[in-house]
Image (tube, rainbow, N blue to C red):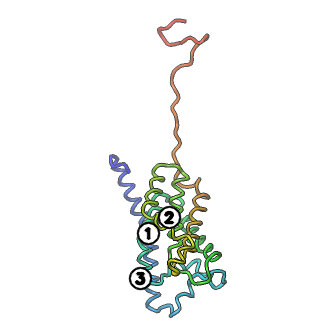
Amino acid sequence: MNMNNPDRYSFERKRMRIAFIPAVVVTAMLWLAFLIEHTGALGDNIYRFAMLPREISGLKGILFMPLLHSSFSHLLSNTLPLLILIWFLFYFYSNIAFAAFAVLWVLSGSITWVIGRESYHAGASGLIFGLLFFLFFSGIFRKYIPLVSVSLIVAFIYGGMVWSIFPITEILDASISWEGHLSGAISGLILSIVLRGEGPQKPEVIWEEDDEEPPGEDGLSNYPGETQ
């Protein structure tokens, strides 16, 4: 952001504010869903909307799983990462953000439905891992310094979460859906490859040609003041 250019600075500030709107809206949806769940408005069995792998009745979890959270601490732990990662997506990849977000939502849930263990899966963690891996690999594939910087920031802040995509997580804490995390990671990686040619790209370097006149006959210079 060039602060020496007031118009550019104002434009980027506006873009940052606009990019934050989807992040707030999605997060607000999660909190609203949590309030509805725990006031009993949907009945006692909220998990009928959750993901149940390889069951036809569990397919609706592809759409509803990210909105459901088992506890306040579960929701709270997902809120800040979701805010930051969605904001990054819509600011740095604004041209493809809506499509990317929708695909990550559906694809991460679909893969979980295929590979998940036979129990109910709920929470936005799969979506978070999808965003995390998409932002990281998109910057790496584009080899564009500002986007690579985003990749490094994401890796620095959330790199420690990566270990929870492995099955050993189930041994440490059976309540964590490592399959959901892995599904999100796979979705983010796949989408970053598919969309690597879309959205922001590394600017092409254009070299200016030398204005020097070509040599005359016999390789002698035609510059004024010089004789052949």
| Residue 36 image point, x, y percent | 45, 87
- In which quadrant of the rendered view does residue 157 lie? bottom left
Residue at 46% of width from left, 73% of height from top? Answer: 26
Q: Amino acid at mark 1?
A: Pro
* Labelled pair 2, 1 in contact (Cβ < 8 Å): yes
Q: Which numbered marker is on residue 211? A: none
Relative image position of residue 43 (x, y in whole percent) = 51, 93
Give residue 94's position: percent from left, percent from top.
49, 59
Residue located at (38% from left, 51% from top):
1
Q: How many marks?
A: 3
Q: Is there a contact, CB below 8 Å, between mark 3 and mark 2?
A: no
The mark found on residue 132 in the picture is 2
User: Which label was assigned to residue 81?
Assistant: 1
Q: Secondary structure at mark 2?
A: helix
Query: Which label belongs to residue 72?
Result: 3
Residue type marked 2? Leu
Label 3 sits on what residue type? Phe
Q: Circle 3 sits in a helix, a strand or a loop, which is it?
A: helix
